[in-house]
């Protein structure tokens, strides 16, 4: 491992939104991470309230961390923050409301950036506004570095690499079946409600929303989001629509374009319900319920009622609930000749909180500590994805942090 530094900055990493629900968990992760101390990495907590930031710092025992007070809509404050950081990690959502000035400041100052957004229409706007400038500045701007969408993006990355290494062929299709146990935090739900309230449903429905210009395949209808149940022989199980797939699939398709996966590369993901007639009924019920709830949430009165019962931003599951959560993503890749590769990405802990915190922090640490080892080299930049911006370095870091990322042995 190499510790890579460019022009001297006050902080190697700044954790923005550190007093929020997931933000507090990122502070704990940095404070307890032996590598942070052993590398001499300098870091700071950032947000709009000095009192709240100091309280979080005290609670986590992170007295070595600095404090940066910066309000999300204050462009000058965002510039100062970005100018003094090599990497910014943000958990301050909804990102369409609170993230745009920070990203713009990171691009202007050549500062690397990661976050946990699942707001694809917002990221589409960032791509249109900042991708070229970020390339020129050598700034890696990498949204989707939590449960949205690292397990999906790295599953496809592993499948493509395994197919090439094992058979010397391109992977033309990857599919993933998720099993999850966990809850929602208020920030995640606030982001969803904001996307729906701002009339972004049509954009969210575009399977190639995040693709670079000129990379939309002529077979686009074949990549439409699944809406019904299916019995899949590769997984030996009934599958139904996965609520996060309309985010994750867009990210993987951008990776496919940026990394040069096979022409017409197909990616889909599902929720795994199990085997037998009970699972078949569950898959059917899920499909109907998913379609109905999505349609209902587009209606203002229904959405407002749902918001009343949702946890507010800054709140989330209990510690015991988060510790008891888990996720498993089984993946299968196919080549045009019929070759197959399999594997799994999985972890213990609530996927939207515990696992997301691990994925986000390890993404930031990859940028802070291993820049020269990342895809494209030190000067590579742009609006990237976890696979295209962090690649195998992130795979290795997550494995070292206890997450399962495996390729199954070839059957003989």
Image (cartoon, rainbow, N blue to C red):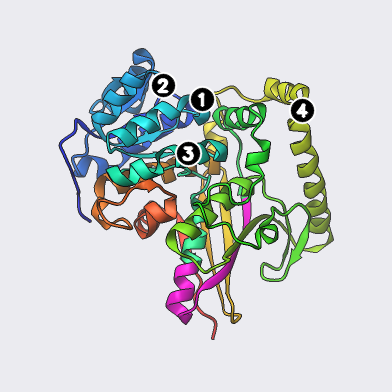
Q: Which mark is residue 299?
A: 4
Between marks 2 and 3, how big is the CA–CA gap?
A: 16 Å
Left or right position of 277 against 340: right
Instruction: State the mark number for residue 26.
Output: none
Label 1 – label 4 distance at C-alpha: 21 Å
Give yes or no for contact between labels 1 and 3 (Cβ–Cβ under 8 Å).
no
Quadrant of the snapshot with the N terminus: bottom left
Q: Nearer the viewer, residue 58 or 134?
A: 134
- What residue sits 45% from the left and 80% below the top? 168
Q: Which residue is denoted by mark 2 in the rendering?
A: 72
Relative image position of residue 387 (x, y in whole percent): 43, 55
Inspect the magenta stretch and tell me whether residue 167 lies in it: yes
Residue range corresponding to the magenta coloring: 160-179
Crowding at label 3, few (<14), some or many (≥20) Cα neighbours within 10 Å?
A: many
Residue 51: x and y in percent read 35, 13
Image quadrant assignment for residue 67: top left
């Amino acid at each position: 491992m190499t510790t890579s530094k460019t022009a001297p900055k006050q902080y190697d990493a700044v954790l923005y939104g550190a007093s929020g629900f997931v933000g507090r968990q990122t502070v704990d992760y940095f404070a307890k991470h032996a590598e942070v101390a052993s590398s001499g990495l300098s870091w700071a907590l950032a947000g709009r309230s000095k009192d709240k930031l100091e309280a979080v710092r005290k609670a986590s025992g992170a007295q070595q961390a600095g404090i940066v007070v910066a309000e999300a809509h204050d462009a000058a404050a965002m510039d100062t923050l970005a100018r003094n950081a090599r990497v910014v990690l943000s958990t301050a959502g909804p990102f369409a409301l609170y993230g745009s000035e920070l990203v713009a400041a990171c691009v202007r100052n050549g500062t690397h950036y990661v976050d946990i957004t699942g707001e694809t229409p917002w990221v589409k706007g960032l791509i249109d506004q900042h991708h070229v400038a970020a390339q020129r500045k050598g700034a890696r701007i990498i949204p989707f570095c939590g449960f949205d969408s690292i397990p999906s993006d790295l599953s496809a990355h592993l499948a493509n690499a395994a197919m090439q290494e094992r058979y010397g062929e391109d992977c033309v299709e990857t599919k993933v079946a998720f099993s999850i146990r966990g809850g929602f935090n208020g920030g995640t739900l606030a982001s969803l409600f904001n996307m729906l309230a701002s009339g972004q449903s049509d954009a969210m429905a575009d399977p190639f929303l995040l693709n670079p210009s000129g990379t939309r395949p002529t077979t686009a209808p074949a990549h439409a989001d699944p809406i019904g149940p299916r019995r899949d022989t590769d997984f030996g199980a009934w599958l139904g629509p996965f609520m996060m797939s309309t985010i994750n699939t867009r990210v993987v398709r951008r990776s496919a374009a940026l990394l040069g996966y096979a022409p017409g590369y197909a990616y889909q993901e599902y929720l795994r319900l199990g085997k037998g007639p009970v699972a078949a009924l569950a898959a059917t019920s899920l499909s109907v319920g998913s379609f109905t709830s999505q349609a209902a949430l587009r209606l203002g009165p229904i959405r407002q009622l749902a918001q009343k019962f949702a946890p507010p931003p800054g709140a989330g599951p209990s510690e015991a609930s988060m510790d008891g959560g888990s996720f498993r993503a089984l993946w299968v890749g196919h080549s045009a000749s019929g070759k197959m590769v399999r594997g799994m990405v999985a972890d213990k802990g609530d996927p939207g909180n515990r696992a997301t915190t691990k994925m986000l922090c390890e993404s930031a640490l990859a940028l802070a500590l291993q820049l020269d080892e990342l895809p494209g080299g030190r000067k590579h930049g742009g609006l990237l994805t976890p696979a295209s911006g962090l690649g195998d370095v992130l795979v290795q870091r997550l494995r070292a942090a206890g997450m399962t990322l495996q390729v199954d042995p070839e059957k003989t």
